[in-house]
Amino acid sequence: MADIEIEVVFSPEKLRAFNRNEAQMGVTLKNLGSGMYWSECEMVLSPLLSLAIDAEMTKARTRVGILKPFSSMTKQVKLYTRPNNYEDEYPITLIAYLYDQDGAIAERVEKKVIVECVAEAKPSGDAVRDVAKDIQK
C-alpha cells in the first residue's frame, strides 16, 4: 500500500463575496512510501465555484505526474467564481488516484477542504466622518 498525503494551498487564501474571483489552488501530493506511482487528482467543487472562467465546471481530473519514492509534486489549478457568490464556506473534494506499474489503481486517497468567501470590510460611519473632518481642515 502507498502512503500518500494531500496538501492544498489557496492564493489568495479567501475569496471576496459578490465579486468575480480568480484564485490559484496548489494541490501537492506527497509520497511517503518507497513505491513509484503515476498520479492523478480529481476535483469536485461546490456549484458556485468553477474550474472554467466562462462556464460552470464543477468536476475535473488532472494529471499530477510520476511520484518517486519519498518525493512530492504540486499541480496548480485555477478556480473561478461568478459575481453571484455569497459569503459562505465552499467545500472542495480532492481524490488522488495512484496507479502502479501494471496500470491498476494502487491507492485512492480523498481529502475535503474548504475555501472561504468573505465580504469586504467596510469602514464604519464614524471612520468615514473622521476622514471627512480631516479633509476639511
Image (cartoon, grey):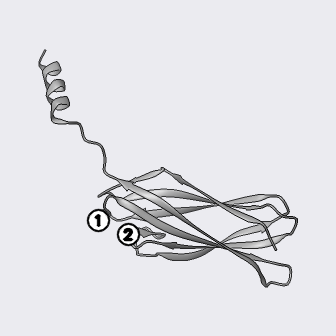
Q: Earlier in the sequence, mark 2 or mark 1?
A: 2
Q: Position of residue 113 (x, y in %)?
A: 53, 63
Q: Position of residue 133 (x, y in %)?
A: 13, 21
Q: Position of residue 12 (x, y in %)?
A: 48, 50
- Quarter of the image holding residue 26? bottom right
Distance from label 2 to label 1 (Cα)? 8 Å
Whether residue 99 is situated above or below residue 18 in the rendered picture: below
Marks 2/1 in contact by CB < 8 Å: the verdict is yes
Q: Is residue 110 left or right of residue 19?
A: right
Q: Secondary structure at mark 1?
A: loop
Between 16 and 6, the one lying in front of the other is 6
Whether residue 88 is situated above or below residue 43 in the rendered picture: above
* Pointer 1 residue: 84
* Pointer 2 residue: 48
Q: Residue at x 46, y 70 (%)?
A: 52
- Tell me the number on the disc at residue 49: none
Q: Estimate how packed mark 1 is, as few (under 14), some (14 to 19) or many (20 or more) residues with alpha carbons within 10 Å.
A: few
Q: Is residue 70 left or right of residue 27?
A: right
Q: Residue at x 47, y 75 (%)?
A: 58
Q: Is residue 137 left or right of residue 29?
A: left
Q: Secondary structure at mark 2?
A: loop
Looking at the rendered image, the quarter that the C terminus falls into is: top left
